[in-house]
Image (tube, rainbow, N blue to C red):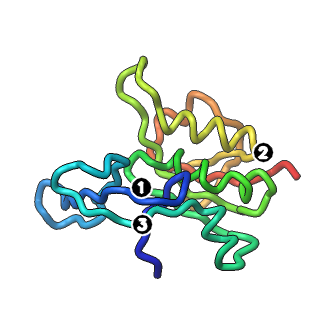
Amino acid sequence: MHEVAVLNKNGQASLKRFRGELGTNEGMNFVLRDLGASGTERVQAVCIDQFCQDHTITYIDLMKIDIQGHEYSALEGAERLIRSGRVGIIFLELNWAKNANASCAAAESIRFLEQAGYQFSRPGQRLNWGRAGDWLESVSDVVAKRVRP
């Protein structure tokens, strides 16, 4: 286990501990780029490409990314691995922007993966692979698989 934040570059980030409304969900913690944010602790941030190079990891069978709206940043940090076909399956949480004019990390993530040759499916017992489309905006989790060599 490595206690690091995953973003699009190595460096520092701020970890905001948030345990949900009932105070019991440690999975609600999130990372901020603002190193001076109040109520946070400074943590080491890594990009997946560099982390894998440093640890001699050449292929990732399954990558799960659920990092509270920073999924696109993590994908950017794994660009070399993803574009070269060295990530098989990606399970991704999607955080869709509620405002149509707002920047949307979910849409950027899907666009990035589609350009890298990935198709998508809802999670479940039977995966039905297909191209990205409006149907993705109704799901919060998606599975992506590289189909283009």
- Disc 2 or disc 1, which is closer to the eye? 1
Circle 1/circle 3 CB separation < 8 Å: no
- Please tell me how crowded label 3 is: few (under 14), some (14-19), or many (20+) other residues with Cα within 10 Å: some
Q: Amino acid at mark 1?
A: Ile
Q: Determine the CA span between mark 1 and mark 3.
A: 15 Å
Residue at mark 2 to residue at mark 1: CA–CA distance: 23 Å
Q: CA distance from mark 3 to mark 2?
A: 31 Å
Please rate how many residues cluster around mark 1, counting C-alpha atoms within 10 Å: few if below 14, some from 14 to 19, many from 20.
Answer: many
Q: Is residue 48 left or right of residue 42?
A: right
Q: What x and y, as percent, mark residue 30?
A: 32, 55
Q: Earlier in the sequence, mark 3 or mark 2?
A: 3
Q: Which residue is mark 2?
A: 117
* SS of the residue under disc 3: strand
Question: What's the amino acid at mark 2?
Answer: Gly
Residue 13: image x %, image y %?
37, 56
Give the camera-side residue of 5 and 112: 5
Q: Position of residue 149 (x, y in %)?
A: 88, 52
SS type, badge 1: loop
Give the residue pinned by disc 1: 67
- Numbered disc total: 3
* Image point (42%, 17%), residue name: 101
* Extreme residue in the left direction: 22
Along the line of sight, the residue nearer the viewer: 23 or 142: 23
| Amino acid type assigned to the residue bearing label 3 in the image | Gln
| Residue at the disc numbered 3 | 44
